[in-house]
């Protein structure tokens, strides 16, 4: 048997040869559109800070005052006296904002998805996922031990067949989808999925990590965009580290759903509550999301501007009306090379490769923020034209 070290060295080498090696770059500055690396400045098109709230002065100030009131760490899990007034008030605000009876905070979106799916299902049940659903949803499904079905992205025909089979063979069936697909920017066909879920008595759960704050007139996300209610989508999950600009995640739904998750979602029970100062800042962020509608307007203008310019250049665009605008290139090698060329031109754009996206669909994942300026998008287009 090879030693652990030898085995890992070989694996890493293979990864490198396949252009799948991932690197981290560290920095010392706040999240912003302009970034500095080794004395050079770059325009970033790779953050999920869609509304430009991650370093909003009012939120930073609120966080600082939260540190004075609550100190730094929560010190314990929610059920073991880690639950503060700041957490409680944020949950109430999230329930109000989403128009649901209650909301429950999780420390991260990844943990929320693990906890929700595994708390609701067991071996007797089924869970149906879109092939492009986020890794955390897939892992939650695996953890639940339910029978897993996955349908090709957006394919309602196959979804219906799976719903039918699941209804015949399993006790309960949970249909789980990203609201906005994180690497494609496409929307799930939620109205059609609601109808199918109703027809086969499946429960529908939407992960709105990339729609929350961005879609809908008041930023309520894809459920506001499609005007869907709690009856139609009983389980709404979203994250607070993307458009909301802070950290954490929540699930919103009925009183019984939330009470059940408090009792049995293991990634809720057995983990430290997030720092109360962050919860305080997030509550204010929710207010900004609702009040500062200009942020969503700027964002939409940038998206339209980019799409019009990219169309003129003949770039292969994905049908996305969200701030996620991928340019699919194919091989990991091509995506890496393009990302590197753009880097040399002063643009930060991530190359996304398998297994994050399917084989042969490596891409540049371009994301926009309300904080971008029109000239920055013109510059991006001019550099994409050179590629
Ligand atoms: C980012 C993301 C998550 C995970 O959220 P974190 O709070 O970053 O752990 C879950 N689902 C989707 C669709 C995401 O994009």
Image (cartoon, rainbow, N blue to C red):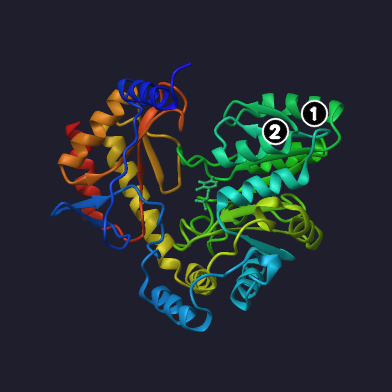
Q: Looking at this view, is 160 or 357 the one in front?
A: 357
Q: Is residue 141 left or right of residue 7?
A: right
Residue 121 rendering spot, x and y as whole percentages: 78, 41
Q: CA distance from mark 2 to mark 1?
A: 9 Å
Answer above or below: position of 37 versus 168.
below
Q: Which residue is found at the position 37% from the left and 70% from the top?
A: 56
Asked if the residue under mark 1 is in contact with the one under mark 2, i.e. CB atoms within 8 Å, the reply is yes
Q: Which residue is found at the position 74% from the left and 59% from the top?
A: 262
State the image quarter where residue 263 is shown. bottom right
Residue 61 rendering spot, x and y as whole percentages: 40, 79
**Count of marks overlaid on the render:** 2
Q: Which residue is found at the position 44% from the left and 26% from the top?
A: 4
Residue beneath disc 2: 128
Q: Looking at this view, is 79 or 22 the one in front?
A: 79
* Pointer 2 or 1: first along the chain: 2
Residue beneath disc 1: 166
For this orientation, the residue located farthest to the top is 1
């Amino acid at each position: 048997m090879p030693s652990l070290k030898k085995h890992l060295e070989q694996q890493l080498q293979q990864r490198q040869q396949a252009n799948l090696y991932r690197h981290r770059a560290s920095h010392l500055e706040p999240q912003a559109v302009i970034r500095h690396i080794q004395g050079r400045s770059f325009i970033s098109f790779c953050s999920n800070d869609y509304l430009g709230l991650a370093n909003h002065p009012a939120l930073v100030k609120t966080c600082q005052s939260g540190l004075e009131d609550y100190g730094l760490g929560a010190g314990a899990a929610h059920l073991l006296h880690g639950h503060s007034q700041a957490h409680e008030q944020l949950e109430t605000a999230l329930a109000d904002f989403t128009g649901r009876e209650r909301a429950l905070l999780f420390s991260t979106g990844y943990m929320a998805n693990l906890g929700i799916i595994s708390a609701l299902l067991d071996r007797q049940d089924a869970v149906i996922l879109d092939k492009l659903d986020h890794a955390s949803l897939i892992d939650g499904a695996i953890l639940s031990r339910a029978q897993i079905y996955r349908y090709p992205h957006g394919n309602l025909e196959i979804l219906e067949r799976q719903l039918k089979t699941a209804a015949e063979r399993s006790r309960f069936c949970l249909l789980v989808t990203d609201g906005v697909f994180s690497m494609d920017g496409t929307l799930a066909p939620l109205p059609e999925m609601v109808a199918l879920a109703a027809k086969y008595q499946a429960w529908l759960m939407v992960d709105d990590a990339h729609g929350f704050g961005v879609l809908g007139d008041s930023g309520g996300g894809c459920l506001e965009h499609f005007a869907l209610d709690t009856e139609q989508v009983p389980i709404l999950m979203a994250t607070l580290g993307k458009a909301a600009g802070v950290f954490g995640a929540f699930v919103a739904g009925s009183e019984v759903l939330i009470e059940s998750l408090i009792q049995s979602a293991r990634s809720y029970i057995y983990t430290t509550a997030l720092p109360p100062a962050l919860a305080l800042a997030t509550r204010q962020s929710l207010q900004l999301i609702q009040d500062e509608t200009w942020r969503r307007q700027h964002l939409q203008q940038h998206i339209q501007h980019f799409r019009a310019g990219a169309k003129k250049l003949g770039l292969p665009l994905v049908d996305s009306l969200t701030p996620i605008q991928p340019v699919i290139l194919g091989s990991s090698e091509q995506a890496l090379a393009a990302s590197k060329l753009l880097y040399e031109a002063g643009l930060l754009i991530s190359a996304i490769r398998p297994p994050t996206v399917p084989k042969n669909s490596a891409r540049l994942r371009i994301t926009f923020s309300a904080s971008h300026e029109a000239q920055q998008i013109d510059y991006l287009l001019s550099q994409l034209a050179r590629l």
